[in-house]
Amino acid sequence: MVELSIIVPTYNEAENLEQLVSGIFKSLQGRDFELIIVDDNSPDGTGKLADELAQQHKNIRVVHRPGKLGLGTAILDGMAFARGEIIGVIDADLQHPPGVLRKMLERAEGGADIVVASRYVHGGGVEGWSLVRKIVSKGALWLSHLFLPQTKNVKDTLSGCFLFRKKVVKGASIDVKDFKLLIEILVKGKYERIVEVPYIFRPRVAGKSKLGARQIFSYMKQLLRLSEYRILKFMAVGVSGIFVNNGILWLLVASSILPPLFAEIFSIEASILSNFILNNFWTFKGRASGGIIYRLLKYHGSVLVGAVVNYVVFALLLSLGLHILVANTIGILIGFIFNYLLSETFVWRWV
Ligand code: GDD
Ligand code: MN
C-alpha cells in the first residue's frame, strides 16, 4: 500500500514525459507515491521511453494498451493497477504544472475527499487562450452546472488534474467509455469535502492536443446521461402540454361551454397544471425546494416569462416578415429555453 497513486495517461508525449516525471518527483519528494503511466501504443515511442523510466525508478509502473482507446478509459485502466489510498490524475504534456501536486496532496491529507486543480479559483487561470477558446470553456462549465447542479460548488468541473480518495468511488458504477472522469466522480461518488487548488493552465510546448469535436459530442452525451435525460423529459412534458392545451380548448369550444377567448384561458391554465404535475413528479422527481404550493406559484411565474418571451419573439419576427408559423415556432423554442432555465435553476432548484 502506498499513500498516493498518480496516473498519467499518454499518447504521443515522448517529448514531454521526462520533464514531467522529473517535475513530479521534485514536487512529491520524500512522499510515499507511485506513478502509473498508461500508454496507448503511441507511435512516437512514448511507451518505450516509459519502460526505460520505470527501470530507473522503482515506483514507476507502465500499463501498455494496444491502441488509442481514449483518455477516460486510460485513467480507469490505470486505477485498476493503483495501490494508493489516494488516486491522482495529471496530464503528461505539462499543461498541468506538476508542482501543484504537492499542495494538492497536503489538502487531501488535511481531510479533503476530492482535490481539484482549478483554473477558476483565485490565483488560477489560463495562459495564451483566445477569446473564443475562453468562451467555449466557460460555456462548457456553465452547462455542467446547469445540467448537474450537484457539481455547482466546484468551479472547474472540467479539470483533468485532480486527487480523490479511493473510497469515494468505491461501489460507484464508473465504467463508461469516453468521458470527463471528474464529473462522473462528482455525480456518482461519495464524498464530503472538496477543495480546489489554483493552477495556471499552460500552453502546450510539444506535441498536439487530442481533444476535438468527438470529445465535445461525448461530453454532451455524458451530461445527458448523468442528468438522467432531464432536458428530454422536460421537452416531452412540454409536448404533452401542447396536446392538453389544444384538447381542453377543443372540448370547451366544441361543446359550447365557453367562448374561445375564455376557453383559451382555461386550457392554458390546464396545460400549466399538467406540466407542473408531470415535471414535479417525474422530470424533477426528488427535488423539493420549498413546499409544493410555493413551487406551483414559482412555476406560474416562470412560465409567464416564457410566454412573454414567446410572444415578443413572435411579434418581432413577424414584423421582420417571417412566416407566421415559423415566427411562432421560433418563439416557442426560445420561450421553452427560458422555461427550462427557470425550472432548473428556480422552481425545482437544487438545494
Ligand atoms: N493513453 C491515452 N489514450 N492517453 C491519452 C489519450 C488516449 O486516447 N488521449 C489523450 N491522452 C493523454 C495525452 O497524452 C495527455 O497526457 C492527456 O491525455 C490530455 O490530453 P490533451 O490532448 O493534452 O488534452 P487537453 O490539453 O486538450 O485537455 C486536458 O486538460 C483539460 C483541462 O484540465 C484534459 O485533461 C482535459 O480533460 C481537461 O479538461
Ligand atoms: Mn493538454
Image (cartoon, rainbow, N blue to C red):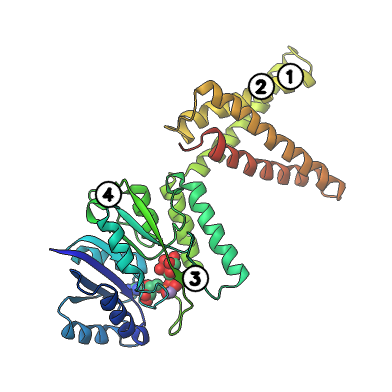
| Dot 1 and dot 3 residues touching (CB under 8 Å) | no
* Residue highlighted by disc 2: 248
Label 4, label 2: how far apart the Cα atoms are: 46 Å
- The kind of residue on which mark 4 rests is Ala
Tell me which amino acid carries mark 3: Gly
Disc 3 CB within 8 Å of nearest ligand 1 atom: no
Q: Which residue is mark 1?
A: 263
Q: Are marks 1 and 2 in contact (CB under 8 Å)?
A: yes
* Residue 339 location (% of width, % of height): 62, 38
Q: CA distance from mark 3 to mark 2?
A: 48 Å
Q: Position of residue 163 (x, y in %)?
A: 31, 61
The reply, left or right, for residue 305 in relation to residue 204 is right
N-term-proximal mark, 3 vs 2: 3
Of tags 4 and 2, which is closer to the observer? 4
Specify whether residue 43 is in view: no
Disc 1 element:
helix
Query: Badge 4: few (under 14), some or many (20 or more) residues near its Cα, within 10 Å?
Result: some
Q: Nearer the viewer, residue 178 or 205?
A: 205
Indicate the amino acid at tag 1.
Answer: Ala
Q: CA distance from mark 1 to mark 2?
A: 8 Å
Estimate the spatial distance between the alpha carbons at disc 3 and disc 4, rounded to whole Å: 28 Å
Discs 1/3, front: 3
Residue type (three-letter) at the residue carrying disc 2: Ile
Residue holding disc 4: 172
